[in-house]
Amino acid sequence: MELKPHGKLTRTLQILLKITIVVTAIAIAVGFYDLYSYSTLPSGVEANDNMLSSDVVNGIVGIIQIVLAIVTGITFLRWIYRSNKNLHALSGESMTFTPGWSVGWYFIPIANLWKPYQVMKEIWNVSHKDSPTNHTIVCWWWTLWLISNFLGRLAFKLGMRADDANSYAVSATMFIISDGLDMILTVVTLVMVTHIGTAYSRNIVEPTGPVDGGSVVASPPPLT
């Protein structure tokens, strides 16, 4: 079985999460600018007929957020897959979820409301082995994830339905709240990933051996 190093992907994910925190902070500031622009729009001026400077800035930051979310999301799923696969092979523990389903549950309706949490909880527990720790942060991560997804959809719907200055201001307010929660979620995710990465490096010994395209080839156990 070929196993890719866990630490390198963990560091990449940490960098992306830190960048996301910075970009989200910028998005919140732009959201307040957008809110101010629509709140102070002179009466008689149609919001739909005028492109405000805040709209341009908001659009640019929004595109950056989308691209960054896609890249970070793919990296996060790769990290989950690799964490599960390596722990399966190296921890010596019996695990409920396979590497494929550790990612696949995110795409199954209804089940994706709780299965990904169970996957992450298992990764946390196995990577920490017998260390005296609890998985409270995993609970916080999943709770924030569910609320963040709900608020994000709500903010998007309000933005699509906005047709006057007041409704655009309401939409901007909801995006500020949504981005604020996203920042908290990202910070919690970063802490969780860091804790798991640290526990993994402390408790799991990745075998040394031939490296093929960045992969570590697991060596067979010594004969006794």
Image (spheres, rainbow, N blue to C red):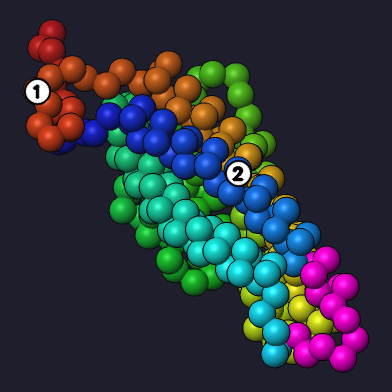
Left or right: 34, with 100 as reference point: right
The answer to whether residue 157 shows anywhere in this view is no
Q: Which residue is mark 2?
A: 21
Dot 1 or dot 2, earlier in sequence: 2
Position in image of residue 154 (x %, y %): 69, 74
Q: Residues within 10 Å of mark 1 (few under 14, many from 20)?
A: few
Q: How many marks?
A: 2
Q: Secondary structure at mark 2?
A: helix
> What is the quadrant of the C terminus in the image?
top left
Picture residue at 17% right of the left edge, 32% below the top: 215
Mark 1–mark 2 Cα distance, whole angstroms, equals 37 Å
What segment is highlighted magenta in the picture?
Answer: 35-47
Q: Residues within 10 Å of mark 2 (few under 14, many from 20)?
A: many
The answer to whether residue 8 shows anywhere in this view is yes
* Of 57 and 73, the residue lying toward us: 57
* Of 156 and 190, the residue lying toward us: 156
Find out whether residue 43 is within the magenta segment.
yes
Left or right: 205, with 194 as reference point: left
Q: Which residue is mark 1?
A: 210
Q: Amino acid at mark 2?
A: Ile
Position in image of residue 3 (x %, y %): 21, 33
Q: Residue furthest right?
A: 43
Answer above or below: position of 163 versus 105: below
Picture residue at 70% right of the left edge, 58% below the top: 30
Which tag is nearer the camera, tag 1 or tag 2?
Answer: 2
Picture residue at 38% right of the left edge, 42% below the top: 79
